[in-house]
Amino acid sequence: MAKTIIVSNRLPVKISQENGKYNYMPSEGGLATGLGSIYKDGDNIWIGWPGLAVSKADHQKEITKKLKTESMKPVFLTNTEIEEFYEGFSNETLWPNFHYFNQYIVFDDDMWRAYQKVNRKFARAIAEVLEPEDTIWVHDYQLLLLPEMLRESAPKASIGFFLHIPFPSYESFRLLPWRRELLEGMLGADFLGFHTYDDMRHFLSSVNRLAGLGNSNGMINVDNRKVMVDALPMGIDYDKYAESAAAKETLEREARYRESIGAQKLILSIDRLDYSKGIPQRLKAFELFLEQNPDYREKVSLLMVVVPSRDQVGKYKELKEEIDLLVGRINGNYSRLNWTPIHYFYRSFPLNALSAFYRMAEVAMVTPMRDGMNLVCKEFIASKLDKKGVLILSEMAGASKELSDAILINPNDMGELVNAIKTALTMPVKKQMANMISMQRSLQRYNIHHWVNLFMERLHHIKHEQKALETQLLDKTITSRLTKSYQAAKKRMIFLDYDGTLVGFDSDPLKTKPDKGLKTILAKLTADKKNRVVVISGRGRDTLEEWLSDFDLEIIAEHGVWIKERGKKFRTLTSLNDNWKGPIMKVLDGYVDRTPGSFVEKKDYSLVWHYRKVETGLGEARTRELTSHLKYITVDRNLKVLEGNKVVEIKNSEIDKGRAATVWLNKHPSDFVMACGDDWTDEDTFKVMPDSAYTIKVGTTSSAAKYRVTDFHDIRKLLKSLL
């Protein structure tokens, strides 16, 4: 029976060792909560590192056996791997780059090799339990290479990937020497999820500019496989936090804390120790607030919780020291016997204590410099059972895209943050409640369970689409069958696209005239009287006639505008006019002026904008802009806008390759039909072919063709084998 395999760097369990015995505590994280309903069901399993280095084989065996009862499978890492893979490449290379702290990046080849090695170790652990129909869901930045590794060993596997931190802009991501490998690793997945549209957009931009792959509405064609990319903001277990806020233990803690603190209004700040969280900036803003608003002294306190993290690492140690100094300075300057400006705790708290803090705080200040989502702000809202309270939220956090009723600020603008504190403290209760109710409704609907279900639904959807567009590789068995059909046939019809199918591409379209090898193939193919060979191309008729006049073949030019049968002159299939070309040419000239390296090719009844010589990225961006523009102005002109390989073509809509090919199919019934092509214009040809025809797609994109080959060399090889 098919199962779901969850894969993350850490398992949802905390393992500690005391007196030679291992203790197991379930994790309370949002991801563990959300995926609990999946990995504990049936034969499903969660694979990850158990959180500590275990070197002895008998101890590994003991932990493996125990975790198996909890539907988990451990991947054991050595101390060196933990240091170089996790502490090293993951947190000293990827983390600062993805959060735009590029000055902190460590570029180290040894750490990169450790990252590759550990991702491969995870792949082997998955392979031990993977079955053909299983679904794999990989999580986060520590395992970016894993999807491609899984794809290598299980090409048909259903693989999803979700990134829980921001994906950086192209300008940041391009700094990484291993950028291409990381992208290709991620593209091994069938569905990639990000918290925000910005993250998704940055990823697609990097894929386009670094891997040369464009996209259409978040769909990328990778090795004859559709990959879907989408933004799915992660929610929280809303009911869990609402129930915790109402729990008896929480209420008792709140009463004790209130008695200790007194009547001050509380501003709450909860973060893990990290430079991306903006903790020093928050402290400086609070200090400036007290300086500018002396009447709030002894009335407002900041309750700051910083959860320990990596504080032996240089940058984090310095950050901890800076926070300590700032807290000490502010408290030293402003404290009174009955009032402490900042209640600072450098430790973690249990859920009931956090719930008590959420209940007590009039204001929550969540102001990271950059954050993938940030669930603290959502937990604060879910805990506000009385609907009172104000959230100050950084627009650099993913959650800001959902929580528009919060006070949104730029964390780099100290004045804005100070003003936000005053606005929050003076906001009328009626407005507080209106904002809170609106945000609570949103979080209740888009909770963690909704996120999990939506992710799995999108993954299953793209797998269904892939199967519908599956094109089989032309292997030896199919080639043998095709050859036998060819040899047995008395009448054969062979449609051959030119550019990309019989020849490769060149930045200069006039440099791809038939070479010696192609001439030999065409001469032998057309010499056989059983064969009727039709070259069906987007090129102009004059060029095709000049290049192919030595061979006894027929021609369909300009995507079906012109046809030339044996012994006859070129003719059009229907009455056409070119009155539209003048206005469209003005538009295309404008794009040529703005896009160095592009040019327009004029044909009898079509215009073609070429961008093969244009800088990578710019050409694709201009293409999207141009096609959108053209589709808008041609909507009532009976014209069709086609995107090909580094070209955009505009022609009369009643003309296409499929319609022209039908002329030959109707006039010359054959017992062997084959059609070969490489781009979207050839899809029209494939669609009109009889069911018995051999339709062959050149390249890796999805197609209506039955079979596919890698490049034009394979087509030439196939034609030679027929001869």
Image: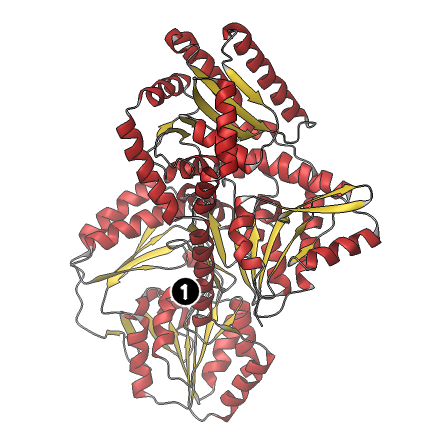
- Residue drawn at x 46%, y 64% is 460
Picture coordinates of residue 459 (x, y %)?
47, 60
Instruction: Write down the quadrant of residue 286 in the picture.
Output: top left
Q: Residues within 10 Å of mark 1 (few under 14, many from 20)?
A: some
Q: Nearer the viewer, residue 259 or 634?
A: 259
Percent of width and height locating residue 191: 48, 57
Q: Nearer the viewer, residue 397 or 346?
A: 346
Residue 110 seen: no
- Specify the color scheme: secondary structure
Residue 265 vertical placement versus 405 (above, below):
above
Residue at horizontal 43 percent and vertical 38 percent from the top: 378
- Quadrant where the C terminus sits is bottom right
> Is residue 571 visible to us here?
yes
Q: Give whichever of 315, 510 is nearer the camera.
A: 315
Report the label total: 1
Q: Residue 169 vs residue 292: left or right?
A: right
Using residue 34 as the reference point, say whether residue 297 is left or right of it: left
Q: For the point 33% across and 84% down, which residue is it? A: 665
Q: Is 626 drawn above or below residue 460 in the view shown?
A: above
Q: In the rendered view of the protein, which quadrant contains the N terminus?
A: bottom right
Q: Is residue 12 left or right of residue 298?
A: right
Q: In x, y percent, where is residue 128?
A: 70, 64
Q: Amino acid at mark 1?
A: Asp
| 677 vs 198: above or below | below
Disc 1: which residue: 679
Residue at x-position 38% and y-position 55%: 216
In the image: residue 587, left or right of residue 2: left
Q: Residue 667: horizontal and vertical position, in percent?
A: 30, 87
Pick the front one: 28 or 491: 28
